[in-house]
Amino acid sequence: MVRSLVLTVDRDNDLGVKAGIRGPVIGRKATLTAALRLGIADPEESDTNAILGALHHHDRLVENADAHDEVEIALLTGDVRVGPRSDRAIASQLDEVIQEFQPDVAILVTDGADDEASIPIITSRVRVEHVEKIIVRQSKGIESTYYYIAKAIEDPRWRAKLLVPISVFLMIIGLGLIVPNGGVLIGAMPLIAGIWMFAKGLGWEEQLERLMLDLRESATGGIFSSMLWAISIFSIILGFVTSYQVFTNMEYVEYSNLRIWAVAIDEALQWIVVSTFAFTLSIGVLRWTEGSFTGRSILLIGFGTVVYTIAEATLDVIRMGLSGSNYILDFETVSNDWGLPLFTIALYYLLRTIIESIAKEDETSPTNKFWGV
């Protein structure tokens, strides 16, 4: 007697989001219902084909099974946030299915590499006899290729994987052409790509992800936060020392009090910025270790950068005016002095928009709204 379990995995939980079905789905009738509801909700969803492929494999096993053999089918769902969270959900549901059916072997039916990432979880609990990948035959014309690229851009899962590398590539080329001596940036691009492919080939990406998870789950974050606090305090002290050296420097004896203050603030400004950044990062590390990181620390760093560039440009203009030089309001002078502050303001606005968009998406995420089959 052999108890066979046909499994299919929806790692990104399209079934829950689009069809309102919570996993695990056990049994042929329930699985068929899930496939129909998902197909009606999104006819272009590839997970529907995987579920139908699992049903086909289940029926074929039933036809060829001996009298005492048992065959069951189950559908496991993960989470929209693909990663450790979805893998934990799949593992929990698989344990539930195994406890109910007690299979001897399992057959996994998937629709691609994303769902196949759950194979180690499955093999750690049950012996996998066969893995079948469902690939839908499509037209190879140019029109269909354009269609699939457009659909990939609309899909949040593939949008980041497709658009982010292209945008980074174009940004590096653009900066390399705009910034003086920008050939270094353009030359660094293949170097960075080579390092990334090298790390990907050696599997360092997974090791880095595990390291980050371990850091978050341990008290190491507190050590980093304490170090950043120390850097912040030490930078404040150095800022005061730098200002004191300006006031006691004999080179500035003939300067007016206002000009000396401008020089002192200008010299200490970098230490003040370092202290502010370290303090903000320490708060971000603490929030990250607690799992309550919202991106506000990043916004504070961006805002601090804006304040620093504006203050630096303002102090340069003040020092020029106090030294008796005339400030010429031509395009070249204004762009050289105020171009960087305006650029940081634009970047800060873009950063704030991105973080607010991500935060709003997390708040309105329907990952916990299920109504069952």
Image (spheres, grey):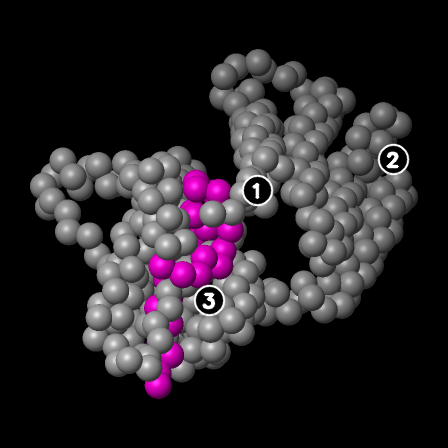
In this picture, is 238 found above or below 344? below
The label shown at residue 205 is: 3
Task: State the extent of the magenta-drawn residues as a range.
Answer: 1-28
For mark 3, give the secondary structure: helix
Residue 14 painted magenta: yes
Mark 1 or mark 2, which is nearer to you?
A: 1
Residue at 37% from the left image edge and 44% from the top image edge: 38
Residue at 33% from the left image edge and 80% from the top image edge: 69
Judge the density around disc 2: few (<14), some (14-19), many (≥20) Cα neighbours within 10 Å: few
Judge the density around disc 1: few (<14), some (14-19), many (≥20) Cα neighbours within 10 Å: few
Residue at 59% from the left image edge and 45% from the top image edge: 368
Residue 116 painted magenta: no
Disc 2 residue type?
Answer: Val
Disc 1 residue type?
Answer: Lys
Q: CA distance from mark 2 to mark 3?
A: 57 Å
Task: Compare marks 3 and 1 and give the one earlier in the sequence.
Answer: 3
Could you tell whether 71 is left or right of 13 in the image?
Answer: left
Could you tell whether 89 is left or right of 116 in the image?
Answer: right
Task: Compare marks 2 and 3 and give the one earlier in the sequence.
Answer: 3
Give the residue number, with chain letter if any, for mark 2: 253
